[in-house]
Amino acid sequence: MTPGRPLSPRAEDYLEAVYRLSLSKGGKPVRLKDVARALRVKLPSAVQMLRSLANKGLVVYERFGTIELTPKGLEAARSVYERHKTLYRFLREILGVDDDTAERDACGMEHHVSKDTLFRLLKFIEFIEGCPEGEPLWLSSFHYYLKRGERPAHCIERHLTPGGGLQLIRLSDLRVGESGKVVKLSGDSVVKRRLLDMGIVPGVEVRVERVAPLGDPIDVVVKGYHLSLRRGEAKAVAVVRIDASESGSSGD
């Protein structure tokens, strides 16, 4: 390979395919037919590319024999593989793209993304995954927007966060007949998205109607609608208790 001259996207695909196959085969040799099958190409096409990669010092290949990555080829293959993984995770886990599309798009994007962009995407994923309360509310709100085509109420109306030393409690701690104003949601992405779908968003008033004998489920009223929450879901909703004299927006 000429110094400073980048590999073509197709060449990178071959290196990544050999690397992936070597991982999946658990140390068993990678053969020509394995690569051709993985990339869905005919054997003559695979032979031609592998010869080219061998001439560049990236693989060790003998016709119809086994294929091995050289140290230089292994470095290049790992680089492509890591780019692919990062892009796939961003598309699948952050944007919610379906699996097949995320895989296909990551394969196309991996050849062109810059190191700086890739670094920032990886750090963004790490930041999201490291949030102590799970998926951030703004990200759950984004997925709500994707699904519904409209923003959650708290994205439209700016609700003031209760001040004055008022104590936040969990919705599950409210007694029957008590009301609270939702301040924030916690928990994983599945819980947050379900709560958003039910209209339980920051700023809305929730009244506890009934609690099952064992504490699960909890029936609440939100904007006149009766909802049934699992106790784990109710624990994920932080509220500030509202005096009976102040309540009234969530009644029937």
Image (spheres, rainbow, N blue to C red):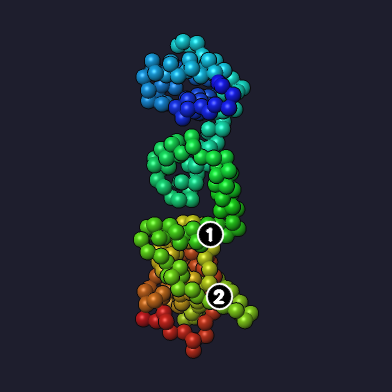
State which quadrant residue 44 falls in: top left
Other-residue count near label 1 (Cα within 10 Å), few / some / many at <14 / 14–19 / ≥20: some
Tag of residue 249: none
Q: Position of residue 6 (x, y in %)?
A: 53, 28
**Foreground: 152 or 194?**
152
From where the camera sits, is residue 96 visible?
A: yes
Rendered view: 164 above or below 29 = below
Q: Quadrant of the C terminus?
A: bottom left
CA gap between label 1 and label 2 equals: 17 Å
Q: Element at badge 1? A: loop
Which residue is identified by label 2? 161
The residue shown at (59%, 74%) is 168
The residue shown at (53%, 15%) is 55
Query: Label 1 amino acid?
Result: Pro
Which residue is identified by label 1? 136
Q: Element at badge 2? A: loop
For marks 1 and 2, the one nearer the N-term is 1
Query: Label 2 amino acid?
Result: Thr
**Foreground: 206 or 97?**
97
From where the camera sits, is residue 214 visible?
A: no
Q: Position of residue 227 (x, y in %)?
A: 39, 70
Other-residue count near label 2 (Cα within 10 Å), few / some / many at <14 / 14–19 / ≥20: some
Rendered view: 11 above or below 202 = above
Q: Position of residue 200 (x, y in %)?
A: 44, 69
Q: Quadrant of the N terminus?
A: top right
Rendered view: 207 above or below 51 = below
Q: How many marks?
A: 2
**Foreground: 151 or 33?**
151
